[in-house]
Amino acid sequence: MVSKLALLGGKPLRTRPFPSWPIFGTAEEKALLRVLHSGKWGRLQGDQVDKFEQSFARQHGCSHGVAVVNGTVSLRLILMAAGIQAEDEVIVPPYTFLSTATAVVEANAVPVFADIDLNTFNLDPRAAETAITPRTRAIIPVHFAGQPADMTAFVKLARRRKLILIEDAAHAHGASWNGQPAGSLGDVASFSFQSSKNLTCGEGGIITTNDERLAAACRSMHNCGRVPGGIWYEHHVISGNYRLGEFQGAVLNCQLQRLERQAQIRERNGRYLAARLSQIPGLLVQQRPSECTRHAYHLFMLRLEAEAFGVPRAAVLQALRAEGIPCSGGYGFSLPQQPLFRHRAFGPYLPGAGRRLDYANTRCPNSDLICREQGFWIEQSVMLGTRADMDDIIAAFEKIQGQREALNLWARKEKA
């Protein structure tokens, strides 16, 4: 006999917590104290950030890394360093954190939204190609949830149309496509080390590239426009101080030592969870191409078909949380429908671009469907659990699916 849903007064399937985040220990404590006592707290005085830049870049298949204060600044610096000019167009997905698009606006360019693939949650190469105009200068595919976008298609497209290919790899630490690390798949890439990310120091980001010219430009722009060999108060380009500090660098050097082992655990659990959940009616897990040789699983993503459960997504989310499974519906709406874009709250912008910064008629049906009705997220720290933890997630979904009629009755009463 199937036990009663916890939401309806039954016993929760799970009461113990999943792994917490961040994970740290004496290594981080000692590293922070070394920096503290050294008195060299800034990036220009110490060696921790420099060490991290080299290690992270090397681990992600790149010869250059430029660490910065966050993963939003990194995108804007990349655009400026790549020579994006005022009113140029940059293609971005609508299903991503706002920085992917607002960085384009901050660079005085125009973000153009192209829809995502319904099954992978990543920017659709065909939609991106359709969105190209004579003003298009770059494409920013997002490796959403930690699964690389179709970089085989995007590299071909960018080369054919002579576009700059920028990876938004904020979710993709340690991921790979055809065995090649995320961060080395396009011309240049941006990673984030914000608190929730698979590699974190609280806040921070890094730019990775194998292009020496781009690396030099980014390094100058993150350091007040200075250039090697110049005097201290000599500034060559519009820029600012976006350098990462030594305390963050020290933490990241320790966290980087943990990344590979954690990536292996997430990958193993993600594959297992995807195989099992895909057998439950109404659950459509993120479709993984064979070229994705490692998924970072910053999120475990799936789509939920409400018809199979007899209730809207919100009720399933509530029931799952009551069983002790942390989960989220993710973004409430696509970026073009964010108040920021609907009201064009961009601050001063170029008069010529004003008309093209109007997204009232932008339609991205796949992204909209996932945002409004189907999207389902499980965060990366959960993916560091045991096989038994994964089995609890599976059992909770099965329990809810098996009692969908009772859940439907509850939902009707709540609505009434």
Image: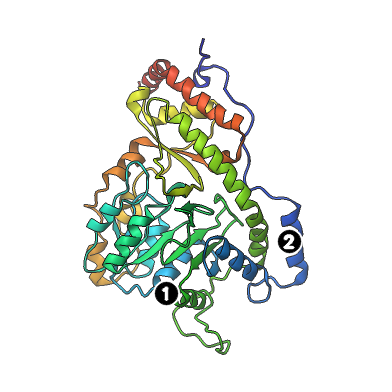
Name the side, left or right, on which 67 lies relative to 99. right
Picture quarter containing residue 51?
Answer: bottom right
Q: Position of residue 80 (x, y in %)?
A: 40, 73
Between 183 and 308, the one lying in front of the other is: 183
x, y percent for residue 311: 36, 24
Label 2, residues with CA under 10 Å away: few <14, some 14-19, many ≥20 = some
Please state the horizontal and vertical placement of residue 12, each as a whole percent of the image. Answer: 57, 22
What's the residue at 56%, 43% (across, down)?
Answer: 266
Q: Secondary structure at mark 2?
A: helix
Q: CA distance from mark 2 to mark 1?
A: 33 Å
Q: Is residue 128 visible?
A: yes
Image quadrant assignment for residue 55: bottom right
* Horizontal and vertical percent position of residue 18: 61, 35
Point 51% across, 25% down: residue? 396
Front residue of 267 and 226: 267
Relative to 372, say whether 402 is above or below.
above
Q: Are marks 2 and 1 in contact (CB under 8 Å)?
A: no
Q: Is residue 324 visible?
A: no
Q: Is 151 placed above or below 303 here?
A: below
Number of dots carrying numbers: 2
On screen, 369 above or below 258?
above
Give amino acid for label 1: Ala
Crowding at label 1, few (<14), some or many (≥20) Cα neighbours within 10 Å? Answer: some
Q: Nearer the viewer, residue 142 or 362?
A: 142
Q: Give the residue number, with chain letter if any, for mark 2.
A: 31
At label 2, the amino acid type is Ala
Tell me which numbered mark, 2 or 1, is placed earlier along the sequence: 2
> Which residue is disc 1 drawn over?
81
For the C terminus, the quadrant is: top left
Q: Is residue 262 above or below residue 164?
A: above
Q: Secondary structure at mark 1?
A: helix
